[in-house]
């Protein structure tokens, strides 16, 4: 298992400027590089499982609330609101939107494991009950 993460800037710290660089395309490029390097060294690149750590999980009540939350997070992530929705570091949306985004990551990024960070038990429970059964 390889956890694909943003450049940290220094141990234990993720620089905000690096967050903006860690986009959907950057994630896919890192996975491609990993698989190509494994093959270059005689290993089966597709045998490597890829992990995604989500540091911000926010489950909203409506598409309008999703849009508002992504717009408010855009300044922190230094990304446009649409980019926040596909940031490897965040999962923001209604239960249906979150499930769809996780399915997209499994396919587009070849993710075999997702690690979630939670600020509260209610979000963890909603994820378990309303999102994950639909992935």
Image (cartoon, rainbow, N blue to C red):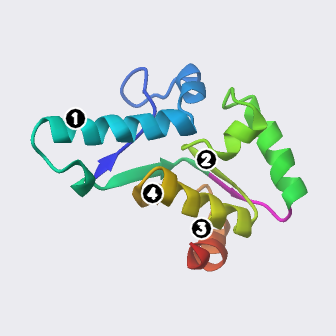
- The secondary element bearing badge 2 is classed as strand
Q: Earlier in the sequence, mark 3 or mark 4?
A: 4
- The secondary element bearing badge 1 is classed as helix
Tell me the mark number nearer the camera, choosing from 3 and 4.
Answer: 4
Q: Which mark is residue 115?
A: 4
The answer to which quarter of the image holds residue 128 is bottom right
The residues colored magenta run: 57-62
Between 32 and 75, which is closer to the camera in this rendering?
32
Q: Earlier in the sequence, mark 2 or mark 3?
A: 2
| Disc 1: CA contacts within 10 A as few (<14), some (14-19) or many (>=20) | some
Quadrant for the N terminus in the image: bottom left
Task: Name the spot of residue 111 as percent of width and height, x first.
Answer: 42, 56
- The secondary element bearing badge 4 is classed as strand
Residue 106: say if magenta: no
Disc 2 from disc 4: Cα separation: 11 Å
Quadrant for the C terminus in the image: bottom right
Disc 4 from disc 1: Cα separation: 24 Å
Q: Earlier in the sequence, mark 1 or mark 2?
A: 1
Name the residue at 81% across, 53% down. 66
The residue pinned by badge 3 equals 124
């Amino acid at each position: 298992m390889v956890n694909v993460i943003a450049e940290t800037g220094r141990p234990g710290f993720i620089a905000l400027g690096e967050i903006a660089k860690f986009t959907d395309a950057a994630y896919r490029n890192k996975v491609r590089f990993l698989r190509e390097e494994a093959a270059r060294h005689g290993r089966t690149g597709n045998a490597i499982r890829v992990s995604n750590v989500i540091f911000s999980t926010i489950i909203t009540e409506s598409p309008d609330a999703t849009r508002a939350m992504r717009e408010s997070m855009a300044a922190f992530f230094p990304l446009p609101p649409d980019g926040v929705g596909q940031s490897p570091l965040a999962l923001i949306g209604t239960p249906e939107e979150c499930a769809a985004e996780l399915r997209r990551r499994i396919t587009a990024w070849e993710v075999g494991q997702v690690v979630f960070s939670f600020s509260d038990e209610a979000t963890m429970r909603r994820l378990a009950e309303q999102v994950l059964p639909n992935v």
